[in-house]
Amino acid sequence: MLLSADGLTKRFGGVVALSGYGISVQSGELIGLIGPNGAGKTTVLNLLTGVIRPTEGRIVVSGQDITGWRADRFTARGIARTFQNIRLFRDLSVLENVTAALHLRHGPGLAPTVLALPSARRAEHGMVARGYELLGLFDLADQAHARAADLPYGEQRKVEIARALATEPKLLLLDEPAAGMNPAETRRLMDVIRQVHETLSLTMIVVEHDMSLIMNLCRRVQVINRGEVLADGAPAEVQADPAVIEAYLGTRRARAHA
Amino acid sequence: MTGTTRGWLLAAGLTALGAAAVWAATASLNNYLLTLIAFAGINVMLAVSLSLSNGLTGLFSLGHPAFMMVGGYIAAILTFPANRKGFMLPDLPEWLAAQQWPLLPALLVGGAVAGLAAIMAGFPVLRLRGHYLAVATLGLIFILRAVVNNLDGYTRGALGLSGIPKLTDLWWVYAWVVITLFVCWRIKHSSLGRTMMAMRENEMAAACMGVPLARTRLMAFAIGAVFAGIAGGLWAHLVTNLTPTSLGVFLAFQLVVMVVLGGQGSLAGAALAAIGLSAIANLLRPVEQSTGIYGMTQIVVALVLIGVLIFRPQGLFGSREPGVLMRRPESSAPSRTAASTQTTHLEQRGST
Ligand SMILES: Nc1ncnc2c1ncn2[C@@H]1O[C@H](COP(=O)(O)OP(=O)(O)O)[C@@H](O)[C@H]1O
Ligand SMILES: [Mg+2]
């Protein structure tokens, strides 16, 4: 078991954003996490990456209870993420965004850096080369020296994924990676996500509110609504679940017809 | 010739050029002018190190003079003539009273203690942000002042420590300016420096990319403080006396102006701004004296700051360095032979 969380509850003052949430993730899975807006999806990701601490519950990664650890320790344990509202290092170049994340595993310490030791230079060259490789996965290598904030929205989302991959995660969490993209861009992005999942055999959880995207991409889907898990299983099962139809598809259809 | 070799040659060339200038200055200028240049050099050290700890990380610390005080007093106590220590500083333990160190180890110990002080102060203080951090670090200056006043058996308190041997000369200052620039430049253009800038750009994202925020912040703060401490030691041995009010809020203000003027995180910008402001202050001093309008320097410095904030808020260079000093990006791209299929279209953009 790569990750298991159980009994996760998060209260913000009086608001219960999540209550009794649980998931167990096996190595190699590609899981879709869906639910209407405000369901608690981002809260799940924030909890699973240490950005916020659960009010109750625990998180175990590779057999170790890491509940309450700092976010950077979660990352060091192999959990990486992207953000729903893009959080790039805006003033840094695209390449620097990725190499900053490579520091975790490959960065030289203070002494070798200051003393300009050959090991520091080798590490730097290695990080730059690896940075180009990661950007290449997303056809971004020729943008390496552009300022991150100057890229179009869709490209920025891809830089975020490349940056998350640079931390060499065992589990990658994507928060609405297709938000703000047009259908063609979305299709291409889904292909890239599938490719990353398969070629790197990377375990992933993809958050999405558009159900159809997830149904094509994932073999396992978890649905949450109002902070609670409604269903967890194969796309077909989940889609047939009355609670899901009621709570989720119902609202979507209603909105689509509105 | 690789970009790295070019960088080293450039650095060596600039260092030699500077040394030649120092040599020419010591051979031709009078003591008064040499002292002014030495002050400018100390300001360069201070501005560059503050630009590292503030500009790269996005912290806003005004505490540099506090760390100068730490380094200055420690170094001065260590170099103070042993035969006068007994009655000037009666509370010094005997083993310390018997010591009379040369300048270099005294500076290093002063810098190290200033760094430790920054780590201790940083634990509580660096939890704060923005204005709160600015005010809290300003508080460090007053805390240090109170400590120095009260430890009068070690520091002579409000009387000030006078008769510090005049060991600092332009060569000492120049050497430390070069070391400060070298170390700060290395850090800024390193992987560690990138994590500091990442933290400045977006704290939450930096944490999620594995940057330990508290430790990284503390490291930047402490590195700045080490150089401030050493600069304080140089200052004490240049002025030859040190009082609890020698290094205060106005200096903190001037240093911030230099950093803002140079561009947040631009080391060359901070260095140039330090030289420029030092020159302005020294040119204005005779004007102040002849017109009797004292405080003109403060006014000009403040006006310069306001002008920069209005007309060029990013400073001289933004957070970048002037183009001639930078390696071109080509040099850091992987070679074509090593490029995989994924990196087949690596056309570089010259983007400096
Ligand atoms: N920092 C916060 N403070 C207060 N309420 C929050 C906070 N973060 C999320 N919430 C609330 O928790 C609920 C779930 O939000 P979120 O996880 O962002 O949903 P989703 O990502 O599924 O759209 C919402 O009602 C939201 O208003
Ligand atoms: Mg969300």
Image: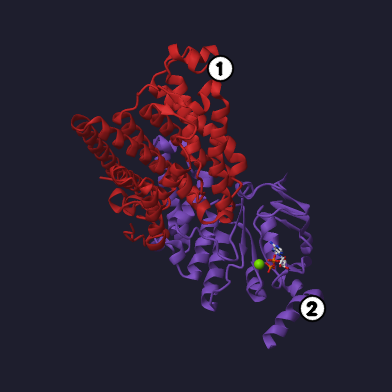
Chain colours: A purple, B red
Q: Residue at x 78, y 58 (%)?
A: A9
- Decide if residue A181 is on the left or right side of residue B184: right
At label 2, counting other C-alpha atoms closer than 10 Å, the crowd grade (few under 14, some 14-19, many 20 or more) is few
As helix, strand or loop, the secondary structure at mark 2 comes to helix
Q: Chain of mark 1?
A: B
Dot 1: element: loop
Q: For mark 1, does the 10 Å Cα neighbourhood hold few (<14), some (14 to 19), or many (20 or more) residues?
A: some
Q: Residue at x 47, y 44 (%)?
A: B53
- Which of the 4 image quadrants contains residue B91? top right
- Mark identifier at residue B91: 1
Left or right relative to B91: residue A62:
right
Q: Name the residue type under label 1.
A: Asp
The percent position of residue B296, horizontal first and vertical second, equals 36, 48
Residue B319 visible here: no
Residue lying at the far front of the rendered structure:
B292
Marks 1,2: beta carbons within 8 A: no
Between B251 and A243, the one lying in front of the other is B251
Task: Specify the label residue A246 is tagged with.
Answer: 2
Q: Amino acid at mark 2?
A: Glu
Residue B306 appears at what percent x and percent y?
Answer: 41, 57
Q: Position of residue B13 (x, y in %)?
A: 24, 39
Which quadrant of the figure contains the N terminus of chain B? top left
Relative to B119, is B18 on the left or the right?
A: left
Q: Residue at x 31, y 59 (%)?
A: B350
Q: In terms of image quarters, where does ligand 2 lie? A: bottom right
**Count of residue discs:** 2
Separation of marks 1 and 2 at Cα, in angstroms? 81 Å
